[in-house]
Amino acid sequence: MKKLQAAILLTMGLLACTNVQAQDPEFTQFYAAPIYTNPAMAGTGTCNGGGRVVLNYRNQWPSLPGTFITSSASYDQHFDKIGGGISLLLLDDRAGEGLLRSTSVSAGYSFQLPVTRKFTMRFGIEGQYGQRSIDWQRLRFEDQIDPSAGFINPTAEPFVGDSKGYANFATGVLGYSERFYAGIAVHNLIEPNQSFFNNPVGIIPRRYTAHGGLVIPLDGRKNPESTISPNVLFMLQNQFTQMNIGFYYNKGPLVTGLWFRQTFGEYGNSDALMALVGFRKDKFKFGYSFDLTVSGARSAAPGSHEISAGIEWCARKPSRKYRKISCPDF
């Protein structure tokens, strides 16, 4: 009976997605997913305007059946000839053990604007094509239940197409100096409809993100690789509002971090304590973070796992126009 109830509840929840507004996936290591966080970060790799490839993987609440798994891959690079950077982002999000899947491909451009000798701004825009798909055959409905044999009857529920495609856009702005960085991004600008039944309320609401921080050397100029970077991220989407506040600590090739995530509004609660450990050697980096749930959901969903990996390469010819950002890598 417990498995039957769980199946019915999961089905109802998936069908409810056709009538309610969705929420975008998120990464704890938001600076390890720079293009997903802010399109204006295209072309901000640390190696003199060279290229960067980043992979991200998040397994949210693996202790629950039908967990949420999000993966992304991105490429970006600065080019003097176009006055900024370009980016390509692939995203895959699966819910309910793959019953509901969202995929997208995005391409973006960011324009670099030197404001003063020490302060730079970037303006980014991104176009996206997304697709949402569902495996109707794996869903279970009430009229399929036989009291003695279980789910054996055909269902009278109407099935529509198993996928829904849509166009989407995002934009962002970024400002930074040698020790300071801050940005604002707006995703889902046109609020595309992703409902399988073309329900007018089945849109992806705009996602507003504001982020910023400082880079503070701990040992002065004697050891510039030892730094602490307090930072904050604020995100608003429909009725969901959250804030991540914490810091990175860098010591040579090692990086650690600690954050606290708080949600506000109708769904407000102290959500999670997030810890990170990362390693960087030459142009390769790897990071692992764990979200420890501190809300009332901890008994059922104690935590989430996230992994990031990236590689950078330098431009063939040193760029005199490129302005490096001191934004964290994880």
Image: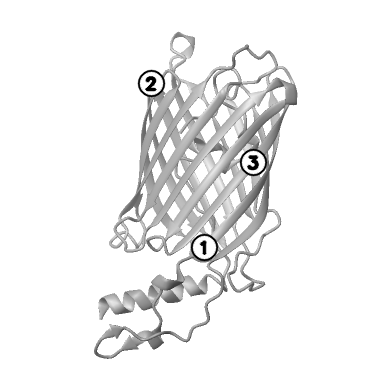
Q: Amino acid at mark 2?
A: Pro
Residue 188 against residue 266 in the figure, above or below? above
167 vs 216, left or right, is right
Of circles 3 and 2, the one toward us is 3
Quarter assignment of residue 165? bottom right
- Disc sitting over residue 133 in the figure: 1
- Disc sitting over residue 107 in the figure: 3
Residue 167 location (% of width, % of height) = 67, 55
Q: Give the labeled residue for mark 2.
A: 253
Which quadrant: the N terminus? bottom left
Q: Nearer the viewer, residue 271 or 309?
A: 309
Marks 3 and 1, how far apart at CA: 21 Å
Of circles 1 and 2, the one toward us is 1
82 vs 75, left or right, is right
Which quadrant: the C terminus? top left
Q: Amino acid at mark 1?
A: Ser
Residue 202 location (% of width, % of height) = 61, 69
